[in-house]
Image: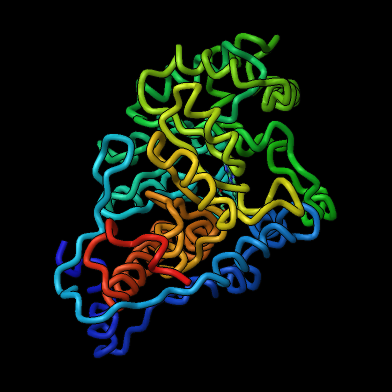
Amino acid sequence: MVGQWADFQYEIYLNGMTGAVPRLPTDLTRLEELAEHRLGPGPVGYVAGSAGDGSTARANRAALERRRIVPRMLRDVRERDLSTEVLGRTLPAPLALAPVGVLSIMHPEAESGAARAAAARGVPYILSSASSTPLEEVAEAMGDAERWFQLYWGSDREVTASFLARAKASGYSVLVVTLDTPLLSWRPRDLDRAYLPFLHGVGTANYFTDPAFQAGLAKPVHEDPNAAVLRFLALFGDAGHTWPDLEFLREHWDGPIVLKGILHPDDARLAADAGMDGVVVSNHGGRQVAGSVAAADALPRVAEAVGDRLTVLFDSGIRTGDDMFKALALGARTVLLGRPYVYGLGLDGQAGVDHVIRSLLAELDLTMALSGHASVATVGPDSLT
Ligand SMILES: Cc1cc2nc3c(=O)[nH]c(=O)nc-3n(C[C@H](O)[C@H](O)[C@H](O)COP(=O)(O)O)c2cc1C
């Protein structure tokens, strides 16, 4: 792994000798603006939009920007190793692609395109329950590459058990249970356009192909799609779940279980007490609770509370390699990347996602080198001010 990720910069400069330049910006914070110009207002509004006036999404960025790296010198960083152990597996870098539903609104390659890009770089792909492609099809696109399944924990136990059995049978190794979305929040960018893809049967592929879901319909999905959409809406979320209910998931999943959407250290302790394997400190990219604590401000307290009992993952606001560095320093073992890869997909399909992954990890690798770290293990709280 010697300098592997950072070498992307030389590849770009060498290609430049024939006049070629990258098709997408290498400053990944610029992708959103480009997507706003090039993609349709409904889809891009769905991806870029947040809860309420967007204050949580802004706070996520501000909390990362406020923290500053303090580089160290003369520490021999010629050979660097970004690999990390997470939930019993070795990853080539501390990165996974976050679960993002409905990717067909961004590009026809949708989840399969993003998953193939992740697989090609050894980055785990986390498939959303609300994907526009059935989980079996995405698994097939990935070969034997690392994939995790994200569950929206709905109100129908049979459908939930069926999802878990299908995910297991298709080689998904880790279960990521998203707790922060029992209901959709107040999202003005979607509300102002009355834009909700699920009502058109987009983002419902796992449900519509599920035998337990189909068993609750009077007619096959294609004969009465409206009835299928109504059943989906009725069982998608369940605001009645409580901590003891996790037992049901444990009974139906024998691999690692990670709870996504944890922000309070007491909830992280409850997750550990419930026998979970990890948490994702996340506020869903500011898409659920406007006025919420920034994810990076919640991270150190959660890591301090349970870092020795649980694997602590992080998302919400990661845009650059230095953001990743900061999240690792604040206590995350691995970082989930959300919107930037979705913009990459929308702008250039699988190749766009590949560009985003390589740019991000090249920047992380260089940030580590130039801050005096040859391995992620030495990045910690005193790497920041
Ligand atoms: C368009 C969109 C769809 C999403 N869909 C899901 C989903 O289906 N399941 C889930 O757990 N999280 C979902 N998320 C949240 C992401 O997994 C992640 O927490 C979030 O994108 C992190 O914020 P950031 O992208 O601003 O860094 C979605 C996020 C976006 C932007």
Total marks placed? 0
Left or right placement of residue 120 versus residue 334 in this view: left
In the depicted structure, whether residue 211 falls above or below residue 196:
above
Determine whether, in the image, residue 91 is placed left or right of residue 281.
left
Image height of 348 relative to 124, above or below: below
Quadrant location, the N terminus: bottom left
| Residue 268 falls left or right of residue 221 | left
Image: 347 above or below 175: below
Instruction: Give residue 238's position: percent from left, percent from top.
Output: 70, 24
Q: What residue is at 40 percent from the left and 34 percent from the top?
A: 309
Residue located 44% across and 64% down the image: 326
Q: How is the image coloured?
A: rainbow
Left or right of 239, for residue 304: left
Q: Position of residue 171 (x, y in %)?
A: 32, 28
383 or 44: which is nearer to us?
A: 383
Near-viewer residue (379 or 287):
379
Q: Residue sitting at 67 percent across and 36 percent down? A: 181
Residue farthest to the right, as pictured: 192
Picture coordinates of residue 18 (x, y %)? 25, 88
Residue 149 in the image: state x and y as whole percent. Answer: 45, 33
Considering only vertical position in the picture, is 245 above or below 315? above
- Residue 175 picture quarter: top left
